[in-house]
Amino acid sequence: MLIGELATAAGISRETLRFYEQQGLIRARRLDNGYRDYPAEVLMLVNYIRTAQQLGFTLAEIGDKLPAIWDAADPAPALAQVLGEKLQEIDTRIAALGQLRNDLAERLGLDCPLTARAPGLG
């Protein structure tokens, strides 16, 4: 599948595909004329990458986790583990943001909110 065909099928630009290739997320073989030729399964891989990005994964995280999932005989458990880890990370960030929000709300009532001692310091 040529890059234009893959781009159309995946609904993304050729530049995005080239970027994914530069990042090592997908691979193409080169034809004699220099054109990129992608195996048909790369479409599924590109769709996985785009879905993972929508779920909050960075391209670096996708690149780190993808080989283990893609190469697994049964990718479902590996994928479930990765999603569970991401969910835990999000929960941790939400808790930290909640604490930050509470600290900011408390400081709003102070005469000088930026010089008051922060909770847990000193």
Image (cartoon, helix red, strand yellow):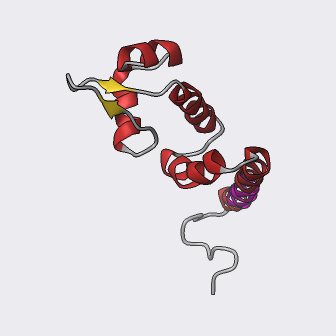
Q: Does the magenta stretch include residue 97?
A: yes
The residue that appears at 55% across and 47% down in the rendered structure is: 62
Q: Is residue 10 magenta?
A: no
Residue 11, image x, y percentages: 50, 15
Q: Nearer the viewer, residue 98 or 56?
A: 56
Left or right, residue 60 beside residue 80: left
Residue sticking out furthest to the front: 32
Q: Nearer the viewer, residue 112 or 41?
A: 41
Does 72 appear above or below 119?
above
Residue 40, image x, y percentages: 52, 24
The residue that appears at 62% across and 63% down in the rendered structure is: 111
Does 46 appear above or below 23?
above
Figure quadrant of residue 27:
top left
The residue that appears at 76% across and 54% down in the rendered structure is: 81
Residue sticking out furthest to the left: 33
Q: Which of 120 and 21 is in front in this view?
A: 21
The quarter of the image holding the C terminus is bottom right
Figure quadrant of residue 3:
top left
Q: How many labels does the image show?
A: 0
Residue 16, image x, y percentages: 39, 28
Does 110 appear above or below 4?
below
For the record, the magenta segment spans 88-101
Left or right, residue 51 beside residue 88: left
Q: Which of 24 and 12 is in front in this view?
A: 24
